[in-house]
Amino acid sequence: MDSISSITTEINSKMATNREEVSELVKQSETLTKIRFLFELPAELKLKIEAKDFIGAVDDYQRANDVLVNYKNHPSFQSIQDVS
């Protein structure tokens, strides 16, 4: 049992760095997904308005506002907020 415990501790120790890297990559991926949503938003809003899907358009707009609020202190996003 001590041997198994020792090996498990060693493996966990070696994998800790990988877990941290994967966690950081997941965070970056989520951020990129939010940014992509913002870039695609104008076309999506246009399509939804043309299709008279006003509820969907408002939902997307509100979601975009939530993203902008989260990143309001970032210089690139600050300029978007200033225009609004």
Image (cartoon, rainbow, N blue to C red):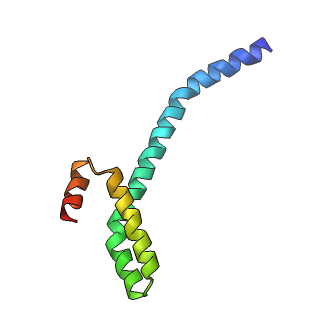
Residue at figure coordinates x 26%, y 47% from the top left:
73
Residue 56 coordinates in the image, percent (x, y): 45, 76
Instruction: Please tell me in which quadrant of the rendered image residue 69 appears.
Output: bottom left
> Of 32 and 14, which appears nearest the observer?
32
In front of the other: 22 or 43 = 43
Q: Nearer the viewer, residue 18 or 45?
A: 45
Would residue 16 appear left or right of 81 to someone viewing this image? right
Count the labels in the image: 0
Determine whether, in the image, residue 49 is placed left or right of residue 2: left
Looking at the picture, does residue 15 appear above or below residue 75? above
- Residue 48 position, x and y percent, is 41, 81
Location of residue 80 (image quadrant): bottom left
Quarter the N terminus occupies: top right
Quadrant including the C terminus: bottom left
Question: Residue 82's image quarter?
Answer: bottom left
Image height of 44 relative to 77, above or below: below
Q: Considering depth in this image, is 77 or 20 the residue closer to the camera?
A: 77
Farthest residue toward the right? Answer: 1
Q: In this rendering, is residue 51 above or below 45?
A: below
The residue at the point 38 percent across, 87 percent down is 50
Where is residue 57? Give x, y as percent.
41, 76
